[in-house]
Image (cartoon, helix red, strand yellow):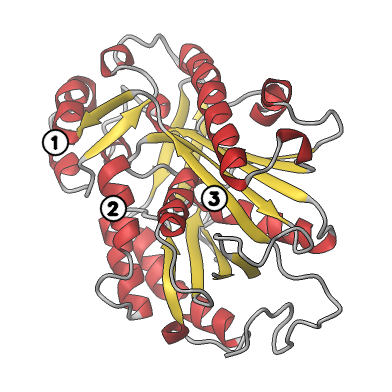
Amino acid sequence: MCLGVQTPRATQSASRPANPAVAGVAVQFPPHRYRQEEAIGALTDFAGPEFRRFALSSGVEARHTALPLSRYGKLSGFTEANDAFVDVALDLGEQALLAALDNAEVKPSEVDIIFSTTVTGLSVPTLEARLAARVGLREDVKRVPLFGLGCVAGAAGVARMHDYLRAFPDQVAALLAVELCSLTIQRQDNSVANLVATSLFGDGAAAVITKGGSLAAPGNTGPRVLATRSRIYPDTEEVMGWRIGSDGFRIVLSVDVATVTEKYLGEDVRQFLADYGLTTQDVTTWVCHPGGPRVIETVENVLDLPVNALDHTRNSLRDNGNLSSVSVLDVLRANMADPPQAGSIGLMIAMGPAFCSELVLLQW
């Protein structure tokens, strides 16, 4: 194996700083938590009678919602839903960011750049700008808000922190992801896509703190980020996304998600690993976004994974639903809470609109 690499087929020079390292991860949820049966009872009135069938096959047993379930049928429209998004997102984002900083033993004033992502609400100024003074970020902190990446954004955010910290190894980067999927539910849409989304998605926020290679101590409990790769697949713009209009966010979700995953992901992962002298057998920790039961099974099949390789992924889906960009960070948090043996290789995988994937090579 060729570990700690910077470019394909080239080992890390002793004169170059070590790779950035994840120093802290935190995930926060709204206080409203419901078993799937409770959600079915509350949402069937406007989701329609077919909703129950989708909800029971979603792999979700419980999830959190931004508002009490009784409020969703009373929302007047997109404006009220988006106002609720901003209020709840700021509170959850603050909690997640402060908890991650505490886990990383980093002061807010030590953060040099903050990336933020969401695809379930709109806010200008963006969430990280509104939170800067609340959490104590410096006035000269650099901000990179990301919108439109959807489920892939958790992994993409980790990748972009890596890219930045390779250039500035003595700095600290933060990533904030907030997704309140329940506030996008369309009450007048009985399409299969909306029924699947209503049965599958949950709400939450996550934050990740990453230290540049010059700052990351050898005893850091989180993984170093060795390399990243982004991939956009041709002619897949209608596979996943939103149609945004006066009624808010209307889901675009094709049955081709699993098909595209099956067609491209296996080759992409194997080529990415091969460029760094690795194979799938060298990967012991899989940090995979839980798209849904069928997508999880497809990832297992195309990569020929051991039976328990995606346990953390399934557990996240079961306990919280699909949290969009937050989900893969929840899986990362679970792996950091029970870290693999030192030196173990990990791979973060997420997919999202475009249709696209993001791969992040890790080493504990």
Residue 185 coordinates in the image, percent (x, y)? 36, 27
Is disc 2 placed on a helix, strand or loop?
A: helix
Q: Is residue 314 left or right of residue 125?
A: left
Alpha carbon distance from label 1 to label 3: 29 Å
Residue 86 coordinates in the image, percent (x, y)? 55, 20
Could you tell me if residue 136 is visible in this image? yes
Q: Answer with mark 1 or mark 2, whichever residue precedes in sequence.
A: 1
Instruction: Identify residue for label 2.
Output: 315
Instruction: Identify residue for label 1.
Output: 52
Q: Is residue 173 left or right of residue 99?
A: right
Is disc 3 placed on a helix, strand or loop?
A: helix
Residue 219 coordinates in the image, percent (x, y)? 61, 64
Q: Answer with mark 1 or mark 3, whichever residue precedes in sequence.
A: 1
Instruction: Identify residue for label 3.
Output: 154
For marks 1 and 2, give the one nearer the viewer.
2
- Image quarter in which the C terminus is found: bottom right
- Residue at the front extreme, as displayed: 219
Give the crowd class for mark 1: few <14, some 14-19, many >=20 residues within 10 Å.
some
Residue 13 found in image quarter: bottom right
Is disc 1 placed on a helix, strand or loop?
A: helix
Instruction: Point out which mark residue 103 bears.
Output: none
Alpha carbon distance from label 1 to label 2: 21 Å
Type of amino acid at the residue the image marks with label 2: Asn
Q: Nearer the viewer, residue 287 or 249?
A: 287
Type of amino acid at the residue the image marks with label 3: Gly
Q: Is residue 327 left or right of residue 1?
A: left
Residue 134 found in image quarter: top right
Look at 62% across and 40% down and name the residue there.
101
Q: Nearer the viewer, residue 107 or 80?
A: 107
Q: Are marks 1 and 2 in contact (CB under 8 Å)?
A: no
Q: Answer with mark 3 or mark 2, whichever residue precedes in sequence.
A: 3
